[in-house]
Amino acid sequence: MWKEWKSNRYFILVMASAVNFVHGNPYIWTVFQPYMQREFGVSAAASSLPFTVIIGIFAFGNMIGGWLQHKIGAKKTVWAGSCLMCLGFLLAALAPTDAPWLVTLGYGALGGLGSGCAFSMLVAIPQGWFPDKRGMVTGITIGVIGVSGVIMNPLCDRILAAKGFHFAMLVVTVIYAVLCLGTWFLKEAPEELQERAASAQPGKEAPEELQEQAATAQQPGKGTLAGQGTYQRQYTAAEMMRTGRYYWLSLAMALAVPSYALVNPLMMSLGLERGLTAMQALAGVTAASVANIIGRVAAPWLSDRIGRKPVVYGLFVIATGASFGLMAAAGPAFAALCSAICLVYGGVVSVFPVMVSDYFGMKHQGSNFGAVMIGYGIASVLCPVLLEAFGQERALLVAGVCCVAGIAATKKLD
């Protein structure tokens, strides 16, 4: 019975999703940020730095995770990344108030690097078990990250109010460490399935069962399998980076970052400035987390049916309107537009991994998606510079322009 459970692909999906809950760690920072600012005596920009670093380093962690996968295997990569992340969070929990840089090092740098290593595998493993439903399983595994924000934000807010920054961060570390034990139950798809689903070259006859799956799938770049009973080419990261499509894909993902990265870490404190009460601001953060979940689940699901690019176009249109609107919005309208931004971000981080496997194959998905996220990481690091240079309102104007440019970059993927 144990062997049957362990080899059941739905059981693997549940375990990967449970472990992926911990990688909602950036989204708790919006409630930690005011407490760090107060307890460590730092500016709003300095207290947002850990969030900026964890988002930026996360992208490079994905690349390292893809490389480690081929050296030590996916399961050990998840273990290594999870341990590094938890150690980083512990360092942040123990940081003295006269050394705020340790929070940035622990939560931001070590947490982001470890989280990125594990995340790339937690997406790739279920995709390997579901070559016929990549959009659906990616939406589920990444959607759990949004659920993390809904659960953890109010929990952390209560602990922060009662016990302060250090105790709350320690509690988060313990919760995440326990959930990471679910890595024990992960298992990569059988080699035979991976080879038949990914390794062959274009035009080679597919096994009968995969031809049946392909018959109901959409075409490459829009759906899941290569379609028409043939395989797609499996690019290495180096081969992928020699194509023009790679750069447009990385650029499009990067252009979706500013609208989210400029708002999320300051969502609660900025909401208070825009006329929300403390209770309303927290409710707005929770609503934004729910929107994030909806985007993560609905966007890849919809992309399986109408194609990836139409969904990405729609996400950029929503983000454009919300970014421009946030320049003047106050009260409930401010909270609603923040939720729209979070919905878009959830959709972007769920659809783009599937687009990478559509265009470049599943065999090297971990390292390939990490390489695509280089632009995402650079954009995340540049956002605080943008905020410092232009101020909040003008930075949001630039974010809206970036969204318009994202539509143009997506068109280049033809």
Image (cartoon, grey):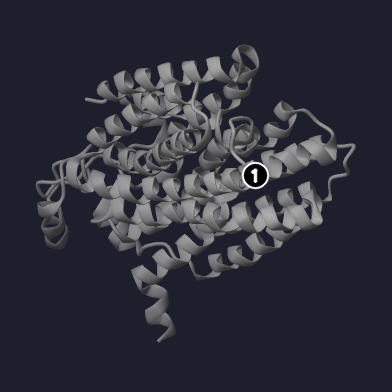
Residue 26 against residue 4 in the figure, above or below: above
Residue 389 against residue 162 in the figure, above or below: above
Provide residue 279's location: percent of width, then percent of height: 61, 48
Identity of the residue drawn at 90% across and 37% down: 98
Does dot 1 land on a helix, a strand or a loop? helix
Q: Is residue 152 visible?
A: yes
Circle 1 crowding by C-alpha within 10 Å: few under 14, some 14–19, many from 20: few
Q: Is residue 370 left or right of residue 246?
A: right
- When asked about the image quadrant of residue 400, the answer is top left
Residue 144 against residue 265 in the figure, above or below: below
Q: Is residue 83 visible?
A: no
Identity of the residue drawn at 63% across and 12% down: 389
Of 174 and 268, nearer the camera is 268
Identity of the residue drawn at 77% across and 36% down: 37
The residue wearing badge 1 is 278
Q: Is residue 243 left or right of residue 289?
A: left
Of 272 and 251, nearer the camera is 272
Of 195 and 159, nearer the camera is 159
Q: Amino acid at mark 1?
A: Ala
The quadrant of the picture occupied by the C terminus is top left
Q: Is residue 258 left or right of residue 362?
A: right
Provide residue 374's location: percent of width, then percent of height: 50, 29
